[in-house]
Amino acid sequence: MSSGARPSHGTGGGWSRRRFVGALAGAAAIATVPAPAAPRSDRAVPTPPPRTPEAGPSVGASVSPAPAAPSSPAPPSGPRPLYLGTYTSGDGGGRGIGVASYDPGTGAITGAGVVTGVADPSFLAVHPHGRTLYAVDERGAGAVTAVRLPGHEVLGSRSTGGSGPCHLSVHPGGRWLLSANYASGSVAVHPVDPSGALGERTDLVTHTSPAPGPGQQGPHAHQFLTSPDGGHLLAVDLGTDTVYTYRLDESRGTLTEVSRARTRPGAGPRHLTFHPGGRYAYLADEVDDTVTVCGYDPATGRLTMGEPQSTGTRGGTSYPAEILVTADGSYAFLANRGDNTLTRYAVEADGARLRLLDTVPVGGDFPRHIAFSPDGRLLFAANQRSGTVTVFAVDRESGELRRTGEPFASPLAVCALPL
């Protein structure tokens, strides 16, 4: 196992823009992409095992509105756990990972303490078995931390080998943790042992080419995730306007690059999400305020970029953040920081098209992250500037969003993880 940095085909660039951009004081649109080639807890909340999101059918290849999703069972009874990512070093910041619960029927959030001993836990993910929570430590000397559930015991941290880690995810097999270092433009792999604790880093790849896009001083890896087929890892880099595709050696935890997809210069890709059919993906472009539909070839891992399209924002400065797709593949939702809205799209042609429907006020300031509850009935928005989490009920037939209850206060809320 090697823990040294390994270039990918310059490093540099500070991380202040990503972290502190949030601290700075429907005509229909359709885009189509070509089909792809064939540590302790102050107060602990009881944590039942997380539920697995439901799978659903893809929408038919038609330009008509997406069909209604099939009826679903009633929401689970009793409170469910909710974890909140924050910054601990910013003015008015939190003290660690926020611990709360939510009512799966009403979306009402109840605070339940803080997991302390984790610095700047700005992004969170849970292991597939539901017994370990992972957080980035978004600092100059970046790290990732494991927390045992439900007792909230901090199991320890490991260096990411880079600066300002801003995203992490767990490989579906549960043996590897993937993280993205924004400031240093690199991606890292850590082994996960049977207890959920992390081992020393097995690989680190820095994006040394292509050259940074307009206005960027270096690579800025913003996301590192696994494709739906499980065969490839994709790293979204805002600084180089590129999505890199890797293969993971699952015995050694090492990465091999297999392809790249370039966006328009200056697009600033931030976050990618896949249609449940597995052949299309949607890319939120932070810098030029657009969304791009991409074709995906599971055999090669190659993305095919489509044409950029509107986010539906009303003018002025706005930065797309997170994009989600419903489990049945009928609707997509985008968080817009600055415009402070959520854009609703109808997903058409088996995932190949997004049709802009409308935007909805998020009810907070600067929605940094959005997430569905496991059953898809609720959408949570973490609003960085207002320090709040707002909750929406999602209508499965129309995709309409309806605010539920009052915003929940959480200092510098930048990530919401409902289980």
Image: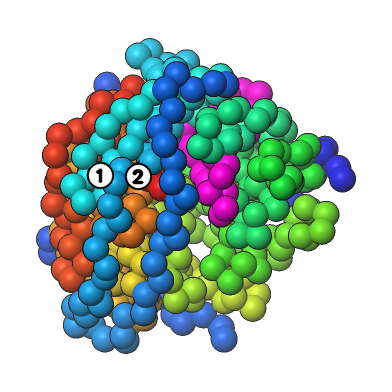
Kindly indicate whether the residue at mark 1 contacts the one at mark 2 (C-beta within 8 angstroms): yes
Q: Can residue 401 be seen by looking at this rendering?
A: yes
Q: Which of 167 and 34 is in front in this view?
A: 167
- Residue 1, horizontal then vertical, whole percent: 87, 45
Instruction: Classify mark 1: helix, strand or loop.
Output: loop
> Is residue 35 placed above or below 124 in the rendered structure?
below
What residue is rendered at 69% in x and 50% in y? 176
Q: Observer-nearest residue: 400 or 292?
A: 400
Q: Residue at x 30, y 56 (%)?
A: 76
Say which residue label 2 marks. Answer: 80
Q: How crowded is mark 2: few (under 14 residues within 10 Å), some or many (20 or more)?
A: many
203 vs 225, left or right, is: right
Is 36 on the left or on the right of 60, as rendered?
Answer: right
Q: Is the residue 219 above or below the residue 58 in the image?
A: above
Sequence order check, earlier mark of 2 and 1:
2
Residue 106 magenta: no
**What's under tag 1, amino acid-wise?**
Asp
x, y percent for residue 46: 42, 36
Place of residue 48 in the rendered image (x, y in percent of width and height, measured from the top left)? 43, 46
Q: Where is residue 201 in the image (x, y as percent from the top left)?
A: 76, 40
Report the front residue among 179 and 306.
179
Horizontal placement of 339 versus 278: left or right?
left
Please tell me whether residue 142 belongs to the stretch shown in magenta. Answer: yes
Q: What label does residue 103 carry, if any?
A: 1
CA distance separating discs 2 and 1? 6 Å
Q: Give the range drawn in magenta.
A: 122-144
Provide the secondary structure element on which disc 2 rests: strand
Residue 337 is tagged as: none
Check the image and name the residue furthest to the top: 91
Question: On screen, 400 above or below 204?
Answer: below
Residue type at mark 2 is Arg
